[in-house]
Amino acid sequence: MDELLKVTDLHVYYGMIHAIRGISFEVKRGEIVTLIGANGAGKTTTLHTITGLLPSSGGEVVYNGQNITHVPGYQLVRRGLAHVPEGRRVFSQLSVLQNLELGAFTRRSKEEKAESLKEIYRRFPRLAERKNQLAGTLSGGEQQMLAMGRALMSKPEMLVLDEPSMGLSPIYVNEIFDIIKSIHESGTTVLLVEQNAKKALSIANRAYVLETGTIRLSGTAEELLHNAEVKSAYLSE
Ligand code: ATP
C-alpha cells in the first residue's frame, strides 16, 4: 500500500503554547488510521493543520505526493481530502438537501451531483426522509450523518473525521461506526480522531496515541487494543 498522507515533524503553536511538538505519522491508501488521546492531547489541532484550517510553524504535510502544508482547506476538497469537523457544524437554518448541495461545490455537472446525492441517500436513508427538514432540528446523530454526507458529496479519496461519536447515545455511536466502516469498505481512506478509543481501535487498521502534542505510541489497532498502557489509560470504562 502506498502513502496517501504523510505528516513529518509537524509543529503548531497557539501564541506561546506549543500544542503540537514534532509529530510524524502516515496514512496509507485504503487504511483507517485513528489518532486517540485524552482531551487536549492535540488531536483536533493536528486535523485542522492537515486540512488547512490552522497554520503550522514547522514540518510538512504531503498528500497524494504533493506538499499541502500551506494549501487552504477549500483547495484540498478539490484534491480529494474532505474534513468533517468536531461538533458537526451543519448549517442549521438550511435544509438537509441544501446542506448536502453545499458539499458538492467541487462537482462539475448536475449529473455528478445528482449521482452523489442518490448515493448519500442510499447510505443514509434517514437523510432522504428528512431532506426538507431544517438541519438545526435534526438530532445529534442525524446531524453527524448530515455532516458526513455533506463531506461525501465531494467524493473524497480521504475522509478526515473529528470525534464523530461525540455526544451521541450508544445506539447512534454504533450506527455511526458502522457507517464509517462501510464508507471505508467502499474504498475511502479514513483518518479518524476519537475519544472513544475502544470503538476507534475496533474498526481501525493502525493507530497513534497522542499525548501533550507528541506521539506516545503507535502500532496496529490490534496491538494497541492489547497494550497494557493503552488499556489502563484509554480503554477502561
Ligand atoms: P479535545 O478532544 O478536547 O478536542 P484534542 O486532543 O483535540 O482535545 P486540541 O483541541 O487539539 O486537543 O488542543 C491541543 C492543545 O492546544 C490544548 O492544550 C489546548 O488547550 C490548546 N488549544 C487548542 N485550541 C486553542 C486555541 N484556539 N488557543 C489556544 N490554545 C488552544
Image (cartoon, helix red, strand yellow):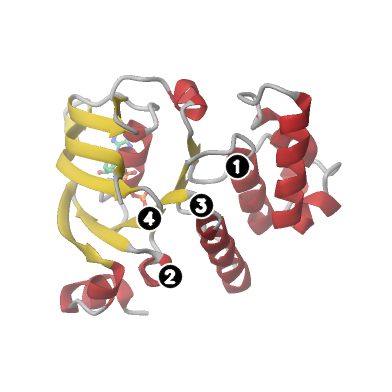
Q: Nearer the viewer, residue 30 or 73?
A: 30
Q: Residue at x 57, y 71 (%)?
A: 174
Q: Which x, y percent locates residue 124?
A: 72, 55
Residue type at mark 2 is Lys
Crowding around mark 4 (Cα neighbors within 10 Å: few <14, some 14 to 19, many 20+) is many
Residue type at mark 1 is Leu
Q: Mark 4 sits on what residue?
A: 31
Vertical relation: 56 (above or below) 5: above
Q: CA distance from mark 4 to mark 3?
A: 9 Å
Of labels 1 and 2, the one closer to you: 1
Point out the quarter of the image occupied by ligand 1. Answer: top left
Helix, strand or loop at disc 4? loop
Helix, strand or loop at disc 1? helix
Q: Mark 1 sits on what residue?
A: 152
Q: Mark 2 sits on what residue?
A: 199
Vertical relation: 154 (above or below) 30: above
Q: CA distance from mark 1 to mark 2?
A: 22 Å
